[in-house]
Image (cartoon, rainbow, N blue to C red):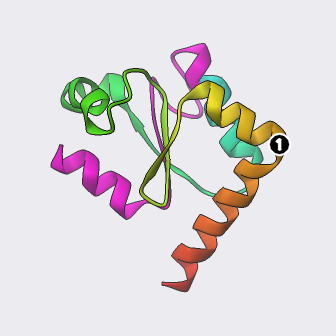
Amino acid sequence: MDRIKQHVDENPVIIFMKGTPQFPMCGFSSRTAEALKQCGQEFAYVNVLADPEIFENLPRFADWPTFPQVYINGELIGGCDITLELFERGDLKKMVEEAAATKQAS
């Protein structure tokens, strides 16, 4: 749990996903990572398949049972459906840009 919190705290935008943004291992992770890429800012990722401890504990961390999970500025945004909905409305890009600006200011 401490490692998960550290990842969330240290990265303004992070996705916990199956696989990597370049090589996603499930459709939900693929679509979510692609939406983040389209926002044009850097984001961190954790491949939960490569880290059994995070895979096991992440669902309890924010009481969200599925993968992927997207966090922006330390807050769980949601999984695939919510992230894609935010992307389609244009809100995700704004959120990601604000998080990137906050990181650059600090």
Residue 85 versus residue 99: which sits nearer the camera?
A: 85
**Relative to 55, is 100 above or below?**
below
The quadrant of the image that shows the N terminus is: top left
Residue at horizontal 66%, vertical 58%? 95
Residue 28's x, y, as percent? 59, 19
* Residue 74 left/right relative to 63: right
Residue 35's x, y, as percent? 71, 37
Q: Residue furthest front?
A: 63
* Residue 64 left/right relative to 71: left
* Residue 93 left/right relative to 18: right
Task: Say if the magenta span includes residue 6.
Answer: yes
Secondary structure at numbered mark 1: helix
Q: Which residue is mark 1?
A: 89
Residue at horizontal 57%, vertical 34%? 21
Residue 60's x, y, as percent? 25, 31
Q: Quadrant of residue 67?
A: top left
| Magenta stretch in the rendered image | 1-29
**Relative to 81, is 36 above or below?**
below
Q: Quadrant of residue 18?
A: top left
Task: Say if the magenta span includes residue 64.
Answer: no
Residue 41's x, y, as percent? 67, 58
Q: Residue furthest right?
A: 89
**Relative to 43, is 20 above or below?**
above
* Residue 88 left/right relative to 18: right
Q: Residue furthest bottom?
A: 105
Disc 1: CA contacts within 10 A as few (<14), some (14-19) or many (>=20)? few
Task: Report the number of discs.
Answer: 1
Residue at horizontal 38%, vertical 29%? 64
Indicate the amino acid at tag 1: Arg
